[in-house]
């Protein structure tokens, strides 16, 4: 085999190895996305949110979350209905999640009797005063990023995500640590100008109805020092929730009979 042939064979094997690694990375990310956002055909949980600002001031929120999948890994609907405290009671957030285009998001503010459309440019802004973003509730579309494999340990994968359109987000890239056993993304760290400034982490999880389920999570703003903790209570799956629940009609008439006690 002459030198040219050796070089060509080496290039083919190298390209094949790179393609295999990229396929593996995308498969791991897709599995994490499925485990975190698509457990069961639908789901419901009650959540308690503690918001702590950089001065230590605290705010509490309590709300119900309903979710229904139209397609695993694809279109999906969310309805979030606030119960407490009084100043946010009956505030409702609705997401009709898409894959090929921007999600539709609405926020109903009962004090103003106003339905507000959350624009795509606002999806990475504060969700009801917390350190979560609107986009965090239904998840960032994985089609918006490219992924690189960083490292693998006995228990986890570490993957780097880079936005395809850097002008659309405030971060340069983020890293995900995914648990091998549950496929859950245990830690997501966001970097801006090369500096870690925000992170989201799963603090507690367990298997419920055969699905790995997050019971406690935290988002920290490392620039301000503030953070938000969320505890999820009585999560349940495969309830047969109706499609009608996830329409604009529910913004003003949320399904209180379905609230978890």
Image (cartoon, helix red, strand yellow):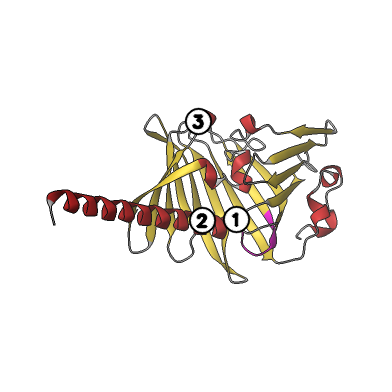
Cα distance, mark 1 to mark 3? 25 Å
Residue 146 vertical placement versus 215 (above, below): above
Image quadrant assignment for residue 40: bottom right
> What span is colored magenta in the figure?
37-46
Contact (Cβ within 8 Å) of mark 2 with mark 1: yes
Calculate the distance from the C-alpha at mark 2 to the C-alpha at mark 1: 8 Å
The residue indicated by pointer 3 is 170
Magenta stretch contains residue 239: no
Between discs 2 and 1, the one toward the N terminus = 2
Q: Which of the two marks, 3 or 2, is nearer to us in this view?
A: 2
Which one is in front in this view, the residue at disc 1 or the one at disc 3? 1
Element on which disc 2 rests: helix
Along the line of sight, which residue is nearer the eye, 49 or 183? 183
Q: Quadrant of the C terminus?
A: bottom right
**Does 152 sit left or right of 51 as displayed?**
left
Residue 101, percent from left and from top: 64, 40
* Nearest the eye: 156 or 20: 20
Mark 3 vs 2, N-terminal side: 2
Q: Position of residue 48 (x, y in %)?
A: 65, 50
Circle 1 residue: 73
């Amino acid at each position: 085999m002459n030198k040219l042939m050796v070089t060509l064979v080496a290039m083919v094997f190298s390209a094949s190895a790179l393609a295999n690694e990229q396929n593996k990375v995308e498969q791991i990310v897709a599995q994490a996305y499925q485990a975190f956002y698509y457990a069961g055909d639908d789901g419901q949980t009650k959540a308690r949110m503690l918001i702590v600002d950089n001065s230590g001031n605290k705010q509490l929120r309590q709300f119900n979350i309903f979710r229904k999948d139209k397609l695993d890994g694809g279109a999906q609907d969310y309805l979030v209905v606030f119960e407490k405290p009084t100043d946010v009671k009956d505030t409702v957030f609705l997401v009709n999640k898409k894959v090929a285009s921007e999600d539709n998001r609405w926020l109903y503010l009962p004090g103003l009797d106003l339905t507000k459309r959350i624009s795509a440019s606002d999806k990475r802004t504060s969700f009801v005063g917390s350190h979560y973003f609107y986009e965090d509730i239904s998840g960032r579309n994985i089609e918006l990023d490219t992924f690189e494999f960083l490292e693998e340990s006995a228990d986890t994968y570490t993957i780097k995500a880079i936005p395809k359109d850097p002008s659309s987000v405030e971060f340069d890239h983020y890293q995900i640590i995914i648990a091998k056993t549950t496929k859950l993304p245990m830690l997501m760290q966001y970097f801006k100008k090369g500096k870690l400034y925000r992170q989201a982490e799963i603090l507690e999880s367990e298997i419920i109805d055969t699905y790995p389920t997050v019971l406690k999570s935290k988002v920290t703003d490392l620039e301000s020092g503030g953070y938000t903790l969320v505890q999820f209570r009585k999560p349940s799956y495969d309830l047969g929730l109706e499609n009608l629940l996830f329409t604009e009609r529910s913004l003003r008439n949320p399904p209180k009979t379905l609230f978890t006690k």
